[in-house]
Amino acid sequence: MIKFLPKTLTELVMSVGKLLLVFLFLLGPFLVAPDRSEAADPDKPLALIDSYRPPKDIEIPRPEAVDYPGVEQVEESIRRGVDYLCNKQNKNGSWGAPKRTKALDIYAPVPGAHHGFRAAVTCMAVTALIQSGDQRSKVQQAIDRGEAWILEKLPKVRRANATALYNIWAHAYSLQTLMLLQQRAGENNEKSEKLAQYTRDQIELLTRYESVNGGWGYYDFTVGAKRPSSIVTSFSAATCVIELQRARKAGFEVSASVTDKAVRSIKRQRKPDFSYLYGAHHWSKPMYSINRPGGSLGRSQVCNLALYRDGDRAVTDQVFVDWLDRLFARNLWLDLARKRPIPHESYFAVAGYFVYYAYYYGSGCMLELPEEQQAFYKAQFAHLLLDLQESDGCWWDFPLYDYHQSYGTAFAIMTLVRCR
């Protein structure tokens, strides 16, 4: 019957059909399996993995040693990244925008999704500029403009709609930024207290948007209630836990029940080799490609770090070493996904936006090791990042509207400063 339709209408129907198939392909894993948690089945809680048990018949891959690029080269790379961020800053003081769209953009309902993206990326950029230690006037002015935008816009960030909770990234990444700005305020007590109140507000918002299952996710296709029934993902829960731990260590009040539930949600997604499920909805398919070590390269770092800082004794130095070694020896699985325009289309269903995220949290794991072991990995991170820096000074891994170059550069700078 379609053959009798006008050609233009036929093409329209086919285009809509293709887009629907792509949509279902990307979101299918979120729609087919329910979250498995004690809340769902209180009488039969899942047994949690409480010890590291890598497969005995699989040898952990080890990277070859590389030379440290040199202090001058690392500092020059950081400086070029800082220059890029200063030049990329919007006139209103923020970074990123809902521009530079492509044929297939990720689900981002306007305007709320972009409020969350822009706030998160702006906070990351300001954090990177502060941590760089660059005292040039243009850098300090960029920080000041970014701070002014954050103080005006951050309090307004909320979930985009019932299904999209990209705001959690803004609430999480703002915590470190606000605390750094508080330190920068010095003896300006009025400004310092204002920033402290902003920090408390963001802690409250993260608490408000925690899933009923414990932990955080950025989609809620289940109920869409006031209290999210989010599809909890291991890495987003770990990201939020790390930032809440940072705030607690700085003296801010963070409810133990909030972080305890989140930590338990991460542990529910941990496998014996300390690869982690993409999300709790994958509990029934642990050997699905994205849940295997190659697919977990971008998640294991952040999850191990969050659990270690929570006091999990199962995360030992050997766990950090083995997964850092995997990160570099098997970096190909991340690199193949880098710059691919469709999420999860690469091998092991890795998405490009995990690349610099993995390096940043991997460098956090590195700093938890004894000092004599850190030099090996500092050389690995520095060597890798200097090689990936673009000619204009930025780093990017996934085309996300006009946010990717800013967040990629921020992650890379924050990683390199740990390699000095």
Image (tube, helix red, strand yellow):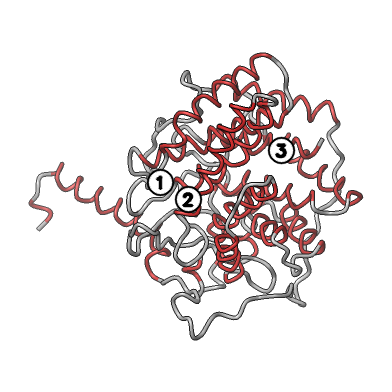
Residue occupying image coordinates x 10% and y 45%: 6
Q: Amino acid at mark 3?
A: Leu
Q: Position of residue 41 (x, y in %)?
A: 46, 81
Q: Position of residue 261 (x, y in %)?
A: 55, 66
Q: Amino acid at mark 1?
A: Ile
Location of the C terminus (image quadrant): top right
Secondary structure state at the residue bearing disc 1: loop
Q: CA distance from mark 3 to mark 1?
A: 26 Å
Q: CA distance from mark 2 to mark 1?
A: 8 Å
Name which of mark 3 and mark 2 comes first in the sequence: 2
Residue occupying image coordinates x 42% and y 40%: 157
Q: Position of residue 178 (x, y in %)?
A: 60, 36
Q: Position of residue 301 (x, y in %)?
A: 68, 56
How many marks on residues?
3
Contact flag, marks 3 and 1 (Cβ < 8 Å): no
Left or right side of 7 for 100? right
Crowding near the residue tagged with mark 2, few <14, some 14–19, many ≥20 C-alpha atoms within 10 Å: many
Seen as rendered, the residue at the extreme bottom is 43
Seen as rendered, the residue at the extreme front is 189
- Which mark is in front, 2 or 1? 1
Contact flag, marks 2 and 1 (Cβ < 8 Å): yes
Q: Quadrant of residue 312?
A: bottom right
- For label 3, the residue is 385
Secondary structure state at the residue bearing disc 3: helix
Q: Amino acid at mark 2?
A: Pro
- For label 2, the residue is 343
Name which of mark 2 and mark 1 comes first in the sequence: 1
Left or right side of 363 for 71? right
Crowding near the residue tagged with mark 1, few <14, some 14–19, many ≥20 C-alpha atoms within 10 Å: some
Location of the N terminus (image quadrant): bottom left
Secondary structure state at the residue bearing disc 2: loop
